[in-house]
Amino acid sequence: MPKKTPLKIKPSLLGKKGELLITNRLLKDYEVFFPYFDRGIDLIVKKLKSKRFYTIQCKTRNFTTRGDYRIMSIKKKDFHKRLKRNLDFFVFVVYNGESDIHFVVFPISWIKKMTKILDKRGVKKNYTFPIHYKDGKIFYKPKLKLKDKSILNISKFVDRDGWKKLK
């Protein structure tokens, strides 16, 4: 297997690349709209033959040579502003090269549940979500000890299963 190297790209361009990768994935079944100003909603999508619109915030992380994980971080104050704008989904793009791209489509209800747990643990500035990638599988592995381990199983949000959440 060839050695992977991170994509050398500015963070803002990587974010735009992630938005375009998501758009490319959705265009078959959805109309995709880009807000003129980015105020926490990156995409607005509508399933063809439907009247329902969804709002999406995109986060993209590049391959890292430090291990099999990506840290998706959301500033706490920005997150609460986004909630006021009726955000529906956070889509995390796990970029491992052009032939190895994965999407984790988190409904806002899951993110709210996790941020509530993190708030109880005393999070001050940023919510961080360690997304691990190993042997072609993606999973959520926080440093928290949780009673309800079912919240850690994010397979239902990954790739094809994740996109089903946008009905």
Image: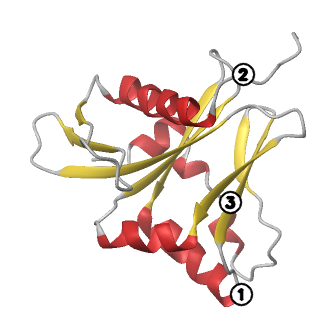
**What colouring style does the render use?**
secondary structure
Q: CA distance from mark 2 to mark 3?
A: 23 Å
Residue underneath mark 1: 122
Q: Are marks 2 and 3 in contact (CB under 8 Å)?
A: no
Q: Residue 15: image x %, image y %? A: 53, 36
Q: Secondary structure at mark 1?
A: loop
In the visual, does 7 lie left or right of 110?
right
Q: Distance from label 3 to label 1 (Cα)?
A: 15 Å
Residue type of the residue flagged with mark 1? Gly
Contact check, label 1 and label 2, Cβ < 8 Å: no
Q: Is residue 128 above or below residue 49?
A: below
Q: What residue is drawn where x is 39% and y is 71%?
A: 81
Q: Which residue is mark 2?
A: 8
Which residue is denoted by mark 3 in the rendering? Answer: 129
- Judged by depth in the image, the label closer to the viewer, 2 or 3, is 2
Residue drawn 68% across the image and 20% down it? 97
* Horizontal and vertical percent position of residue 24: 38, 23
Disc 2 on helix, strand or loop? loop
83 or 132, which is in the foreground?
A: 83
